[in-house]
Image (cartoon, coloured by chain):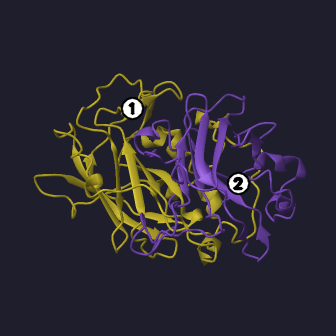
Amino acid sequence: MSGPLTPSQTVGPFFGVGLPFEKGEQMVPPGSAGLIRIEGQVFDGNGEPVPDALLELWQPDDRGHYRTVVDGDATRGKSRGPSTGFGRCRTDSEGAFSFVTVKPGATPAPDGRMQAPHVNVTVFARGLLRHLVTRMYFPDETDANATDPVLNLVEPTRRETLIAKNCGGVLHFDVRLQGEQETVFFAI
Amino acid sequence: MSQDEREPPYLYPDYVGTRLRAPAKPLVNLPQGFHDFPAPLFPRAIAELDHDLTRQHAGEPIGERIIVTGRVLDSDGRPLRNTIVEVWQANAAGRYLDQDDQHPAPLDPNFSGAGGCLTDDDGRYRFITIKPGAYPWKNHRNAWRPAHIHFSLVGSQFRSRLVTQMYFPGDPLMPRDPILQSIPDQAGRDRLVSLFDPQTTVPEWALAYRWDIVLRGRTATPFEDET
């Protein structure tokens, strides 16, 4: 009875009134054990910052479990910990964003192989008719990253666009929408 | 036609904003199932009255009061219940409550233009709002966006995530709008146009528009191989 899927359209430049919400970028309460900070900027094909982008992070908990919607209550569910695994942050005038979360645990791929710990990153922006999907991996997981089934699908020269850099304890992850250093994006 | 061919391309030069933001390198395909993980809990609280954009301030907003309702379904036709629907829109004069909106049309102190709700057991959502106005944008000479309401849905899966726009039937600006026209086929564009719904219209109070939304399910569903 349903028809084909509803097509996507851009978020446009004025999503600020509708999508960001208070503390959306704080995926765990301040002072939580194992807290990490992720910072970065979004750039366009000219290397200019993108001030009207919105990022969402989706991730499992520190044991690699996705905390999922419990039937009957999509917003609260049966929480076992402080994080829901969902974060949302818009970019500022410098194209910058930041999140506070915990490092996710490793998760098995559908084929049973283990995936290195990673955060799923979704990018929306004016000028993006569809959202983009990428992943942020961790710089201290050299061995797990080397055998990660998704990183191994990516040309070796482009893999580094998916691995955050540790800058004095803060994980730095830039998103380059287009150009020489373009971030690897995945088909949805 | 595959689902990918039904979606707008990333690069659509008539929409100037895509030119420096569309990825130039091909997207990397993951094997089936790698994006099949369930949606996380949504941390934003949705309050009972968030579905009514006309009751967020002391007075009523200026404009044509409307009801916008429909069902959220997965690609197998199953209703998605208790799923989050977020909306935002311009006011009746075509102005957003956003400091970057420079359109010289009045703001309405009684209208913020944002709302949210959870779908019911039939997957149904319902908003009360005012009909948004068309507004100019600088994409090309004399460019105007057709009236539209932005919708954001999380759905049940990572793959379900959808941000899109709902349009109004008969709007003469639609054929001239590169954002809507970026969708390759007419059937796809038509899926973003609501229907006037006389049954839901409330006499002496508000016209109603109906618009159903179909989200991706898990890759195991056969739908995407059809046609």
* Helix, strand or loop at mark 2: strand
In the image, residue A65 sits, relative to residue A23, either above or below, namely: below
In the image, residue B57 sits, relative to residue A32, either above or below, namely: above
Residue B71 occupies quadrant: bottom left
Question: The numbered mark 1 sits on a residue in which chain?
Answer: B
Residue B20 occupies quadrant: top right
Residue type at numbered disc 1: Tyr
Residue named by callout 2: A135
Quadrant of image for the C terminus of chain B: bottom right
> What residue is drawn where x is 37% and y is 34%?
B96
Q: How crowded is mark 2: few (under 14 residues within 10 Å), some or many (20 or more)?
A: many
Task: Please identify, in this view, whether the residue under mark 1 or under mark 2 is nearer the observer.
Answer: 2
> What residue is drawn where x is 66% and y is 68%?
A64
Which numbered marker is on residue A141? Answer: none
Question: The numbered mark 2 sits on a residue in which chain?
Answer: A
Viewer-nearest residue: A54 or A66: A66
Q: Residues within 10 Å of mark 1 (few under 14, many from 20)?
A: many
* Helix, strand or loop at mark 1: strand
Residue A119 occupies quadrant: bottom right
Viewer-nearest residue: B209 or B90: B90
User: In the picture provided, is A140 more to the left or to the right than B99?
Assistant: right
Viewer-nearest residue: B24 or B201: B24
Colour given to chain A in the rendered image: purple
Residue type at numbered disc 2: Arg
User: Can residue A8 be spotted in the picture?
Assistant: no
Residue named by callout 1: B135
Chain letter for yellow, please: B
Discs 1, 2: same chain: no
User: In the picture provided, is B67 more to the left or to the right than A3?
Assistant: left
